Amino acid sequence: MKSNFQQGDGLTPRLLFLLSGRLEETIQTVFSLKKGKWLIVTNRNKWFFKRYASLDQLKKQIQLSRFLLDNGFRQVIPFHSVGPIKFENQFFAIMPYIQPAKKPFSFRTSGEREEALQLLSLFHRQTEKLPEGIAAGFPKFDQTGKWSKRLAAFQSEFAELARCFPSAVLDNYAEMGKWCLDRLSNGEQDREAAALIHGDVAAHNFFRSSEDVLYLIDFDLAAQAPGLFDYVQWTHRVLPLVGWKLEKVLEHQAVSRHAQQKNWLLYTLFPADVFRECRRWLYAPLKEKPAAYKHAYELTVQPFMQRLHFFRKWKEEWERRYG
């Protein structure tokens, strides 16, 4: 058997022997794709093999996948019936390996962005019908609580961050976050049917196959919440790609229909990405720190004046509407 995996990453010959027996296929080659994810090539098929944080996390994702497929949502990848697989207090599942398109999916073009939004909208319409017994397995999403903790962590780590980032820039981001949270905590509750949100609406969680089918993948952060919060995440990911022009985001109906909600602009203006990536750099393993710092710097410092203009413009708009 050929392979390029490291046994220290949890994929051992004993685990592969167990997997081979479950599949009733001979494993020929193993390729490590990312940490905790592998391509398994057998004498008959190609499989995607993934490690999960817990058995509960895996079981609820299997239930969700089955529900979606049974209700006609075909753009999710099914789990193989041989799982879950438990091995030495680790939990794994196997899925069909789908050949990716030559060009990875991104949010860079308007067409791709609209395609992603349509898939998200379809996902939300299906998960609004999710039986309580399945929905209850997913946590309830608390955006304000999550962001309050993220801002508090950013402020507590300010001195360390200021050694490598301009303190005036960091101060401004902290003030942006505080302004948004002060108004969110006193704002009206969002009025929208609860669904299951994906919870990590990054371009890499949309997978285009070589047959031009777009799939929604990796539901590790799925949670009970109005679909609004997936569109907020999508907006945060897209704004840097469109030069911080909110008007470009609002060209998409799935987003624009939320824009009149009182909290929508506050969610949009909160600099969640800055707080997330600065913290990621601080706690990155030593060998990953240079790349993490470069990414955080490019996100935080380089576009700062553009972001500041964006914040001030739409802060004034929010105050004009609601202040």
Image (spheres, helix red, strand yellow):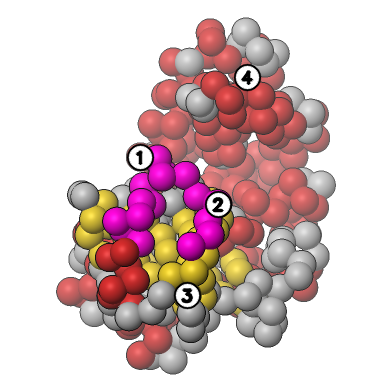
The residue range painted magenta reads: 1-16
Could you say which is closer to the camera, residue 52 or residue 64?
52
In the image, residue 11 lies in the stretch drawn in magenta: yes
Q: Amino acid at mark 3?
A: Thr
Residue for badge 3: 42
Gap between marks 4 and 1 measured at Cα: 21 Å
Query: What label sits on residue 4 in the rendered view?
Result: 2
Could you say which is closer to the camera, residue 225 or residue 257?
225
Q: Earlier in the sequence, mark 4 or mark 1?
A: 1
Gap between marks 4 and 2 measured at Cα: 42 Å
- Give the vertical position of 110 relative to 73 (above or below): above
Q: Quadrant of residue 72?
A: bottom left
- Residue drawn at x 76%, y 70% as measured from the top left: 102
In the picture, the quarter occupied by the C terminus is: top right
Gap between marks 1 and 2 measured at Cα: 42 Å
Front position among marks 1 and 2:
2
For label 3, the crowd category at 10 Å Cα-Cα, with few meaning under 14, some 14 to 19 and many 20 or more, is some
Q: Amino acid at mark 2?
A: Asn
Q: Position of residue 299 (x, y in %)?
A: 70, 34
Does residue 276 appear left or right of residue 101 in this picture? left
Front position among marks 1 and 3:
3
Query: What label sits on residue 309 in the rendered view?
Result: none
Residue for badge 4: 170
Gap between marks 1 and 3 measured at Cα: 46 Å
Query: What label sits on residue 145 in the rendered view?
Result: 1
Q: Earlier in the sequence, mark 1 or mark 2?
A: 2
- Give the vertical position of 311 relative to 56 (above or below): above
In the image, residue 189 lies in the stretch drawn in magenta: no
Q: Amino acid at mark 4?
A: Leu
- Residue drawn at x 41%, y 60% as measured from the top left: 50
Q: Earlier in the sequence, mark 4 or mark 3?
A: 3
Confirm whether residue 86 shows in the render.
Answer: yes
